[in-house]
Image (cartoon, helix red, strand yellow):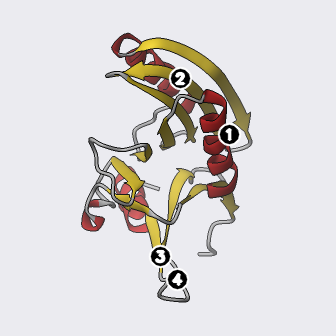
Amino acid sequence: MPNFVRITFYLATFLFFFNVAESAEDAPTIRFELPINWNTSSHYELEVTIPSGFNSLQGFDDWDKAILIEFVPEGEDGENWKEIITINKFIGKNIEAGIFVDLLQKQLTPTVENVKVLEKTKEKFPGYEKATLFLSYDYQNKHEILGLQYFSGPNDCIGVQYTIRSKNDQQAMAKITSFFETATHVKEQAPAAE
């Protein structure tokens, strides 16, 4: 597929579903389906569901164009948050997940204090790569635990980061791990018949 057509197709299929909950008491669910690899006979997408009670720091109308989309709990903002979930989208940028995670760690380390690598993995699956990193560190007198997972195919790289400000590394890491296990899923789909 020509690059222009592929990028246009990705932008058109960068699907985020804003599902209205069944009752007025339930908060709406925000779900993203983001391309990881559409170059194989099967398509791989990362589905990310944002927990209820989180609001976007970026305007809804900007989501399809934004490289970065951030969510914080209701009542918090970009400066004063206890938790923040970030989605990074590098569509058509040919970035490998493992290389990007290494670079992110290298760039972050000199800007923070007391850095500890809690976990770091890189895995290859049929059709995509996954890189995971958990760090704890102190930044501007606040202790933070950062968990991130990046997924890539040959052209696209999608990342999800969850940072919690907490003194308890194990508790924060367990919450982030639970989020990754329940709210992020790689979906394999056969391409539509032409």
Can you give x and y, in whole percent of width and height, for residue 92 in the image? 41, 44
SS assignment at label 4: loop
How dense is the environment of label 3, judged by Cα within 10 Å: few (below 14), some, or many (20 and up)?
some
54 or 12: nearer the viewer: 54
SS assignment at label 3: loop
Mark 1 lies on residue: 174
Q: Earlier in the sequence, mark 3 or mark 1?
A: 3
Mark 4 lies on residue: 21
Q: Earlier in the sequence, mark 2 or mark 1?
A: 2
Mark 3 lies on residue: 28
Q: Hey, what amino acid is under mark 3?
A: Pro
Q: Which mark is residue 136?
A: 2
Q: Is residue 161 above or below residue 69?
A: above
Identify the image quadrant of the C terminus: bottom right
Q: CA distance from mark 2 to mark 4?
A: 35 Å
Q: CA distance from mark 3 to mark 1?
A: 25 Å
Q: Select label 4 or label 1 by which is in front.
A: 1
